[in-house]
Image (cartoon, rainbow, N blue to C red):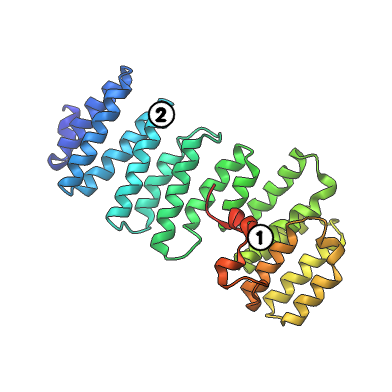
Amino acid sequence: MADTEKVPIKERGIHNVLQKLEKSIEEGDTYSALQMFKTLYFRYSREKKWEDLKQLLVRGAKMFLQKADINSGSDLGNLLLEVFTKTAAPVDNKHVGMILDIFALYKADNHPSKRQFARGAIKWSTNKYNNDQGDIRLHTAFARSYRQAKEWSIAQKHYIRSSVAEEYAEMILEWVQADNAVKELDVYVARAVLLYLCLGHVQQGNKFFDAIKVKKPNLDSPLVNFVDLLLQAVEAEGTLPTFELLRSKYAPSIDRDPNFKSYLEHIAFVFYGVQKQGAGGLGGMLNDLMKGFLSNDQ
């Protein structure tokens, strides 16, 4: 039986098209293949053949990425995200799976097109969840990829929005080694905990801190004591005076990182509703530093 005969009749049209386009890519005519994919994108969009179009774009993106044509693969991946947005596609296993299938074919490097695709995917999932965090499954996959590429700061943005705090703890230890900053481990740990709290993720912050204590049981410093007590305070819904007392008592340790004061100001807003002086609302609370870090931009 011919390959085409194995395909259900209703799917043979797109199957035949994909076979022809795959042949063009194999023969090195990637430009013509990409233009044909885009032509089909507009045609299927007009005809509202959304499921066929999703299949076409996923297969096409994977074909190009498998041939290391990152820009073309990303073009089709980004068109897929446009389809998801146009059709209000649910953030479910099917659609998240399509994104992850494409993303998995990127090499472990920080290619601009890879970052653009990741940003678009998070933006789509954020809109559908109606929050400012994005889909946990996407963040987890992206965090692991950027960790593998040793893009530590980008991986960190995703880890604090994922559900794998223990992995994040492992990455922090790798990052410290790569930076030759073993003596500053407590600063890296404190930064991670404070960023979790900036997003209101107390449970994940505790999981991260517990994992660090298991891996580094002898880690001890005033800064470590501070984040330990801070986690206990916010988890127990402690009062603002308790928070202020901790911030005052451990001020010298907090000063070890110039960003920590901004993080703590944001934490005061998240948990106690304290407005930054001269600022109004959450938008005012997020200064340029916090906007840069807490945004979903990679």
Numbered disc total: 2
- Residue found 22% across the figure and 49% down from its top: 50
- Residue found 65% across the figure and 78% down from its top: 272
SS of the residue at dot 2?
helix
Residue placed under numbered mark 2 in the picture: 66
Residue placed under numbered mark 1 in the picture: 195
Write down the quadrant of residue 209 in the picture. Answer: bottom right
Where residue 125 sits: x, y (%)?
42, 56
Disc number for residue 35? none
- Residue found 22% across the figure and 25% down from its top: 20
Q: Amino acid at mark 1?
A: Leu
Q: Is residue 164 visible?
A: no
- The residue positioned farthest toward the left in the image shown: 9
As measured in the structure, the alpha-carbon distance from the residue carrying label 2 to the one carrying label 1 is 36 Å
Q: Look at the picture and state if 205 lies above or below 232.
A: above
Q: Look at the picture and state if 263 lies above or below 55.
A: below
Q: Is residue 255 left or right of residue 9?
A: right
Q: Amino acid at mark 2?
A: Gln
Q: Is residue 15 left or right of residue 209?
A: left
